[in-house]
């Protein structure tokens, strides 16, 4: 069972976004975003997925190091790594992405 939570945050793109297409040819952009937790030295990494026309715009305008605003729904995901240990990460399905070209 997964619990979705609404999230809004500012962060920085960690690497150039990756654009893929579903089997129905719907664009999906995957963006790694680092969020600095205010008042601490902690950085939280998120995997952000963007769909449709906004996905194509993200691929065009987002690059590693760019500041980005994200609004969407978050899910905590887990998997077992090659080392046999359970890993967790936050996956966000974005419905709004704000960015600047300068």
Image (spheres, rainbow, N blue to C red):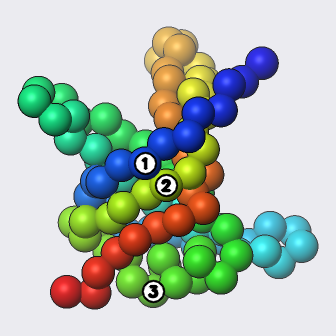
Q: Are marks 2 and 1 in contact (CB under 8 Å)?
A: yes
User: Whole-percent x and y of residue 60?
Assistant: 45, 86
Tell me if I can see residue 82 in this picture: no
Residue drawn at (65%, 32%) of the image:
4
Q: Which residue is mark 3?
A: 60
Q: Are marks 1 and 3 in contact (CB under 8 Å)?
A: no
**Quarter in which the N terminus is drawn:** top right
Find residue 46 and name its label: none
Q: Nearer the viewer, residue 9 or 51?
A: 9
Name the mark nearer the viewer: 1 or 3: 1
CA distance for labels 3 and 2? 19 Å
Crowd band around label 2 with a 10 angstrom C-alpha radius: few (<14), some (14–19), many (20+): some
Find residue 71 and name its label: 2
Residue drawn at (28%, 44%) of the image:
35
User: Whole-percent x and y of residue 37?
Assistant: 21, 34
Provide the secondary structure element on which disc 1 rests: strand
Counting residues from the N terminus, which is met first, the one under dot 1 or under dot 3?
A: 1
**Quarter in which the C terminus is drawn:** bottom left
Provide the secondary structure element on which disc 2 rests: strand
Left or right, residue 97 beside residue 44:
right
Tell me if I can see residue 46 in this picture: yes
Q: Which residue is mark 1?
A: 8
Counting residues from the N terminus, which is met first, the one under dot 3 or under dot 2?
A: 3
Residue drawn at (43%, 57%) of the image:
70
């Amino acid at each position: 069972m997964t619990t979705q939570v609404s999230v809004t945050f500012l962060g920085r793109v960690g690497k150039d976004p990756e654009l893929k297409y579903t089997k129905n040819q719907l664009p999906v952009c995957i963006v790694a975003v680092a969020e600095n937790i205010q008042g601490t030295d902690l950085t939280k990494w998120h995997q952000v997925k963007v769909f449709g026309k906004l996905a194509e715009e993200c691929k065009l305008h987002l690059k590693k190091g760019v500041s980005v605003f994200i609004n969407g729904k978050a899910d905590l995901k887990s998997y077992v790594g090659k080392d046999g240990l359970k890993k967790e990460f936050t996956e966000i399905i974005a419905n709004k992405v704000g960015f600047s070209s300068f």
